[in-house]
Image (tube, rainbow, N blue to C red):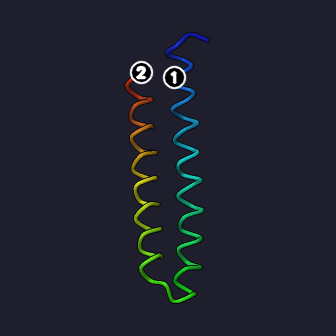
């Protein structure tokens, strides 16, 4: 596998990994909210949003390799 192909593969992996993390953060945000900790829930939702944005940037980067 050449370096461009390897990077494209890694970017896809990183994007998927970040999306998985975002899902976990949202799950825990729901739990935090159920505990009555709205501030913690908000922070976790913000972090999930950042993870999703990062995943989208990785996907865009993949498109730029070709």
Q: Quadrant of residue 6?
A: top right
Q: What residue sits 47% from the left and 68% below the top?
A: 44
Would you name the residue on which mark 1 appears?
7
Q: Which of 66 and 33 lies nearest the eye of the viewer? A: 33
Which mark identifies residue 50? none
Q: Position of residue 3 (x, y in %)?
A: 52, 13
- How many numbered badges does the structure rendering display? 2
Would you name the residue on which mark 2 appears?
65
Residue 29 left/right relative to 66: right
Mark 1–mark 2 CB contact (< 8 Å)? yes
Q: As displayed, is residue 29 above or below residue 50?
A: below
Q: Which of 50 and 59 lies nearest the eye of the viewer? A: 50
Q: Which of 28 and 8 lies nearest the eye of the viewer? A: 28
Q: Quadrant of the N terminus?
A: top right
Distance from Cα at disc 1 to Cα at disc 2: 8 Å
Q: As displayed, is residue 43 above or below residue 10?
A: below
Dot 1 or dot 2: first in sequence order is 1
Mark 1 surroundings within 10 Å by alpha-carbon count, few (fewer than 14), some (14 through 19), many (20 or more): some
Q: Dot 1 lies on which element?
A: helix
Q: Position of residue 51 (x, y in %)?
A: 45, 52
Q: Quadrant of the C terminus?
A: top left
Q: What residue sits 37% from the left and 25% below the top?
A: 64
Q: What residue sits 60% from the left and 62% below the top?
A: 24
Mark 2 surroundings within 10 Å by alpha-carbon count, few (fewer than 14), some (14 through 19), many (20 or more): few
Q: As displayed, is residue 56 above or below residue 42?
A: above
Q: Dot 2 lies on which element?
A: helix
Q: Quadrant of residue 62?
A: top left
């Amino acid at each position: 596998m050449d370096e461009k192909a390897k990077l494209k593969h890694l970017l896809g992996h990183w994007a998927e990994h970040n999306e998985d993390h975002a899902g976990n953060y949202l799950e825990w945000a729901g739990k935090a909210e159920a505990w009555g900790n709205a501030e913690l829930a908000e922070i976790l939702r913000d972090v999930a949003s950042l993870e999703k944005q990062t995943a989208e940037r990785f996907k865009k980067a993949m498109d730029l390799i070709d």
